[in-house]
Amino acid sequence: MKLIFIRHGLAQGHFSIDQDKDFERELTEEGIKRLHRTFKLFKKIQQNIDVVFSSPLARAVQTAEIFWSYFPESDLELMADLDILDDPRHLVEYISFLPTDGCYAFVGHDPHITQVIAALLALHPEHDFMAIKKGGVCVLEGGMWKGFKMELLLPPKVIKLIAESEASI
């Protein structure tokens, strides 16, 4: 099983306690541009994805739709378990029931997705062992019973450096 975790791209404004306002925040033009750069690069190393799951928040849905445009053969689904306010353990439980031979992408929010990653890597989810920057990608491979290993962590700075070096060749 391969699990791809993506933090939504740069969004307008900042987190708001007013849930309705926070749910409606959309990506900025710069955020959209950076996501295309990231996903174009990621497509070179990952060919197929079975399902792309997205948080229902607007910025995550937009991120998932951009990601899905690079993997149109995959299914695209909204998932309440990726909501920033949901308990990360719900997503871990959901993952435990997915077919083990699949590749699944999850587009969501930090610290929610890093807590899920921590749980899957058998780390204490309350410790800040990592943070995924906006537009960053983390890939785990393994299974619920044999354990997961981090295969790839692509922060936006690295993606930008790779894109710049490819442009200069």
Image (cartoon, rainbow, N blue to C red):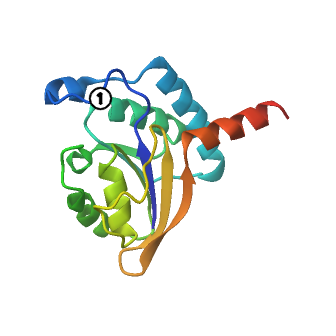
Q: Nearer the viewer, residue 152 or 94?
A: 152
Q: Quadrant of the N terminus?
A: bottom left
Q: Quadrant of the C terminus?
A: top right
Relative to residue 54, is residue 93 depicted above or below? Answer: below
Residue at image coords 41%, 60%? 129
Residue reaching furthest to the bottom:
146
Residue at image coords 49%, 25%? 32
Q: Which type of secondary structure does the marked residue at label 1 adopt? A: helix
The answer to whether residue 127 is seen in the rendering is yes
Q: Nearer the viewer, residue 84 or 81?
A: 84
Residue at image coords 48%, 18%? 29
Residue 48: % across, % down: 54, 52
Say which amino acid is labelled 1: Ala
In the image: residue 77, left or right of residue 73: left
Q: Nearer the viewer, residue 121 or 52?
A: 121
Relative to residue 122, is residue 107 depicted above or below? Answer: above
Residue reaching furthest to the top:
29
Label 1 crowd (10 A; few <14 / some 14-19 / many >=20): some
Q: Please identify the quarter of the rendering in which residue 107 is found.
A: top left
| Residue on which disc 1 sits | 58
The answer to whether residue 98 is seen in the rendering is no
Q: Nearer the viewer, residue 156 or 61?
A: 156
